[in-house]
Amino acid sequence: MKKIIFILLAAGLPLGIATLANPDGLRLAGWPTMSVLALGAFGIQWLAFIPARVLQSERFYDLTGSITYIAVTLVAISVATTPSGAQWLIAIMIFLWAGRLGSFLFRRIHAAGGDQRFDHIKVSSSRFFVAWTLQGAWVVMTSCAALTAILSAEQPPVGAIYVIGAVMWTTGFAIEVIADRQKSRFREDPGNEDQFINAGLWARSRHPNYFGEILLWAGIAVMAIPYLSGTQWVVMLSPLFVYALLTRLSGIPTLARRGQELWGDDPAYQAYVANTPRLVPRLRQTTQPAIEN
């Protein structure tokens, strides 16, 4: 019963936010367009869950999420009333981010042969279904600001707020890409097996990829500000949701526990944790010598 209630909340709250964010009078198949897009996002996850459960495989989990972002954004830009260049740019940013991250995670999970996070989840139908439902919630909550802006009939001139948001997105995207590449190369080196990364951006932050992720979605939300009015301001919960999920509910807490399990007794790891910011990268490189591990 608890899982049923959780699933209803995980789907119902994002659907409610999407409905509140719908531009006035904009409908698709007789329903508020944002509601249709949100239902579509969940529908894709629930359909993908069926073969994933049969095969007990999580290999297409992240890729399905990325495809969902691209799909709902394509629908939004297709049904929008004469979208401007500024609205197209928001859509292109979603395409770039989803395409890059989806392909990166897909290659990583196939190279690793699986994802440890799902070892105790995929064996249970209910827990596995919850995981797919949560991905639908993630897609809806993170993309709602972008979709609302894309669907808006308003076409305000590009101003400072929009430009600031675009700079935030570009910076966050670059940080995430660089951090992911640095970690991938680190893992590919046989000499680094069972070691933790503390070089490059990872010397400035213990989770630079998450910082980039949070920053780019905050940038999208800022870019959407000129298009918002009334109840649509609810989409500003989007970057707060990303921050809370990655720093409080999942993401960093999960990795911190795993790090303690693997290297908690290692003095080099203890020094790294003590001297390196958890999230926001320090601007100046430390003058201390690199920590050997």
Image (spheres, grey):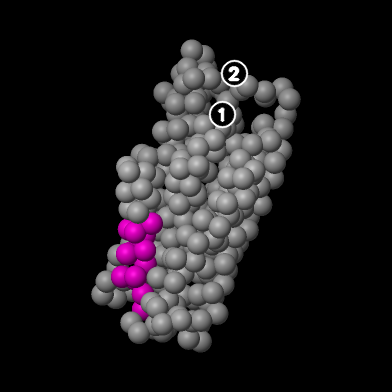
Q: Nearer the viewer, residue 87 or 9?
A: 9
Label 2, label 1: how far apart the Cα atoms are: 9 Å
Label 1 sits on residue:
198
194 horizontally vs 259: left or right: right
Mark drawn on residue 293: 2
Magenta includes 62?
no
Identified by mark 2, the residue type is Asn
Instruction: State the residue at coordinates (32%, 48%).
Output: 5
Magenta includes 22?
yes
In the figure, 59 relative to 144: above or below?
above
- The x, y position of residue 76, in whole percent, is 50, 75
Question: Badges 2 and 1: C-beta atoms under 8 Å apart?
Answer: yes
Q: Quadrant for residue 257, please give it.
A: top left
Which stretch appears magenta?
11-23
Secondary element at image label 2: loop
Q: Main secondary structure of the magenta part?
A: helix
Instruction: State the residue at coordinates (73%, 25%).
Output: 190
Instruction: State the residue at coordinates (52%, 18%).
Output: 263
How would you rate the neighbour count of disc 1 (Cα within 10 Å): few for under 14, some for 14-19, many for 20 or more? many
